[in-house]
Image (cartoon, rainbow, N blue to C red):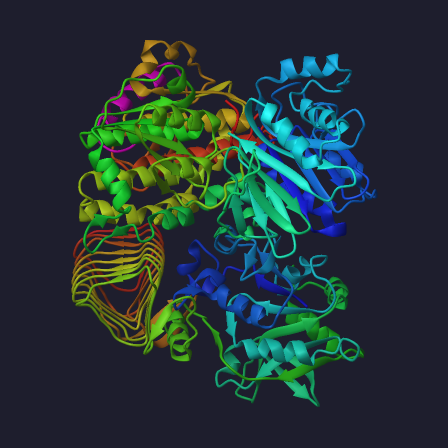
Amino acid sequence: MDAVVLAAGEGERLAPLTESRPKPMLPAANRPILSYVFDALVAADVDSIVVVIGYERDHIRDQFGNTYRDTPIEYVTQEKQLGSGHALRQAKGAVDGPFLVLNGDQIVAPEMVADVRDAYEPGRAFGALGAIEHADAAQYGTVSIDDGSVTAFFEDPANDEHYTLNAGVYAFDERLFDALDATPRTDGELSLPSTLERIVGDGNTESIQAVRTEGLWVDATYAWDLLTVAERLLDEGWIEGVAEEDDVWVADSARVHDSAVLRPPVAISADAVVGPNAVVGPATSLGRNATVGANATVSRSVLDVDTRVGANASLHEVVAGRAVDIGAGTVAPSGVADIPVAGHVVEGQRVGAVLADRVSVEGAGSFDPGAIVGTGATLGVGTHITGRVDRDTEVVR
Amino acid sequence: MCGIIGAVGRGDETLDVLLDGLSNLEYRGYDSAGVAVSGGDLSVAKRSGELDVLEKALAGKSLPGTVGIGHTRWSTHGPPTDENAHPHMDCTGSVAVVHNGIIENYQSIKEELAAAGHEFESETDTEIVPHLIEAQRAEGVSFEQAFRHAVGRLEGSYAIAAVLEGSDTVYAARNDSPLVLGVADDATYLGSDVPAFLEFTDRVVYLEDGEVAELSLDGWDVTTLAGEAVEKDVRTVDWESEETGKSGYDHYMLKEIHEQPRALRQCLQERVDELSGTVDLGDDIEAAVQNAESIQLVACGTSYHAALYAAELFRSQGVPAQAFVASEYVTSPPPHDDDTLVVGVTQSGETADTLSALRDAQRRGVDTLAVTNVVGSTAARECDGVLYIRSGPEIGVAATKTFSAQVLAVNMVAAVMGNGSASHEFVSALRDLPGQVQTVLDETNAREVAERFVDSDAYFFIGRGYDYPVAMEGALKMKEISYKHAEGFPAGELKHGPLALVTANTPVFAVVTGETGSEKTVGNVKEVEARDAPVVAVTDGRTDVERYADEVLEVPETDPRLAPVLANVQLQLVSYHVAKKLGRNIDKPRNLAKSVTVE
């Protein structure tokens, strides 16, 4: 069976981390979110993976190339981001027979993918989708189920009724492409759930199998959710390609000074460096070639590729993008903050700071909990940051 | 300069395997292509033009046969025509031969064969080989002995393979041209390089000069030309075939430009240690460079620009160093003493001119070091030491990621000269380089610059110090893939002549990074500006050159020794976008081939 992965979207709510790369490429512990999606598909023995790419697509192609763990990858492009249904439509002609569909920005347990693959009966139903019980289902897309079939879709459930989460794991065959073509667009956009809703709605005889399944399912809605995502993956032990001992993962090519302390769970990627007397962890991951300087303390944080933490810095609950340079003596304590995102305020979030790609903190900086700094911003020596700093801003004391 | 493929043991799939192999080899030459399959009847198909011309000619036809050879050609003798395409056959149509290299004594053999009544259809040097085999066969000699005899007559460079009607054996031999066996459980392959058959097997046997390989349904065997058995190691290459596809990019070149951060990470891995501030390239290389009282670098094309850069870098370490164009080095070897080290910089490790220079040095008793990308290549095997740049396969004819990795590698060599103790700052800068290349890729405005100047008459590139090789390389890239006139100059030389060429329609790309001399380059920029030429500054922002520039290509500030890598990435992208806008055949520019294995 082939598979289609939808990875063309930007993920605006994860800004500023998505200012220069798409959400599927954000770090989940020490690897991009998308690599976990591919892991699940490889575990489900798919023949090939068709990836729909769009926003900042070079990052995806550069990372994964032509194959993932010997499974061929084909790329198709969605030039304008006009919804999940429109994205999927681009894969027509690239898949053969029944196929799986996954979101490229949600991590799902491999068993869920296998369950949907095994349950789908093209002769009996139009499609199948994975459904799970999830405490926070109402934050995501949900479905109503009756007698093993989906009866309704809710993209933004409003009340507190009991909902079952649409896990975003689907199986279809070619009929889906005709259904997408026949679905009217809303504001120029075409979503997959709205197409499926039409399929199972009044006057249609087609059904969609609801495949009840369970297991790990994580999605980052906001940038700081990457901290929880990393913690879940570290707790699950879903860290690949790195040797583990007692929940401490250290790559062969990483260099950890003898006097440094790694507090589990913690993952240290290839080429990373941890200096003398540094303390890293728990619930922390260092991306490839990241560096933590002497005497620095980093806990419950995600530091992406090439990020540097200077000597004596103290970071708690910090998300740092690629090549962030955090100068010596910088302090980011954790705390509870109300954070404005795209016109509304997300209340009561535990987060130290979010630093987008290539932010430079020149030394002895400090952050109020919940500080959000845009791509390439430069924060001068000794500056104290509260709230939001826009892309490429220079802040001086 | 051509590509050879061979396959034994694939049964009905033989033709498909050969065509796949040829498409993987097309970067080695692409002005004609052909295949011969045997096992029973001998069938040959060949066409001038790119491989798809042959594929179209073969569409819907079956060429029956269970063993075969194929060839993609880059002309050296005779224009690219159907007749001159390989494989070549004898008068009876029972022997087919493919060849890469130049047979220097072919005229005398051809006259001798013609006098004996042989008729030739092509102008190639290769065609004498099937006729030599035919002549021996006519005297009742076996295919194997006839092949050995024919090869024994040849002078010059060759990788050669032959099939015979009614035989399921392929014979192959090499001298000064690359040839590799690919070994699988039930099949054996032959290729000019590993990517030719990498999708079928990653186990390889490198043939040496003067060896003959027999590929049959029973497996493979390597002997000397005289027939003595040779023990060969089977090595496993760690390139993955995934690295040889385009990843959804329009061109290999752009894919490979984007692969640079990864290539540089691989080049650095476990060689630099920031905790101790040291660089470790192994004891052999360390001893070789520390014992060298002077260094001569030999290289061609893009690798020569990396060598120019390396020479300046080594001089800054107090070691007399000079870069030479390899073909000139052979023609007029410079003086050396006992403690001279000759460093050959060659992506493929098969560049004939560079190999020739290295061999010349070895004959004179000088130590040699190869800086190459290809594990097990001729340069790697023949030199006293080898430093791999670990870029992975580079398919685009225009070298990109391998230049960056060469520059990075020679920086590590320079660090080793001082007992391996660079400085923590420098090791940090080395480790930051991949991420800074990524920054350039993420934020570049090269496409806009290319669009603005795509219709210009010519392009000039200037730089001083470490930026001078970048200027040269920027111009070479532009020439290679856009076919536009482009020249690189040391910034100070502009006013000594080339300035006469500068007009309002010849943009000048000024590479201005680091501190040493860059203010003077800014002065040269002002000279250009005064002649109304548009100026594109490639700068790390350490000078005020932006004030005099019409367009700016920014690079992150780093150690002045490493900034040229970043500046070069911007110029790679400008050339790419100019060529793309002009609709050029970017991965396979006219008249060029990836690695030139003839002198």
The residue drawn where x is 45% and y is 19% is B506
Q: Is residue B489 above or below residue B240?
A: above
Residue A19 falls in which quadrant of the image?
A: bottom left
Of residues B254 and B131, the one nearer the viewer is B131
Q: Is residue B365 above or below residue B181?
A: above
Percent coordinates x, y for residue B25 in the rendering: 60, 38
Magenta residues, start to end? B511-532
Of residues B230 and B356, the one nearer the viewer is B230
B347 left or right of B73 in image: left
The residue drawn where x is 52% and y is 28% is B596
Percent coordinates x, y for residue B436 in the rendering: 34, 46
Residue A229 falls in which quadrant of the image?
A: bottom left
Q: Is residue B42 magenta?
A: no
A344 left or right of B71 in image: left
Percent coordinates x, y for residue B94 in the rendering: 78, 32
Of residues A253 and B233, the one nearer the viewer is B233
Residue A78 falls in which quadrant of the image?
A: bottom right
B231 left or right of B419 in image: right
Percent coordinates x, y for residue A166 in the rendering: 59, 78
The residue drawn where x is 55% and y is 47% is B244
Q: Quadrant of the N terminus of chain B?
A: top right
Q: Is residue B520 magenta?
A: yes
Res B550 seen here: no
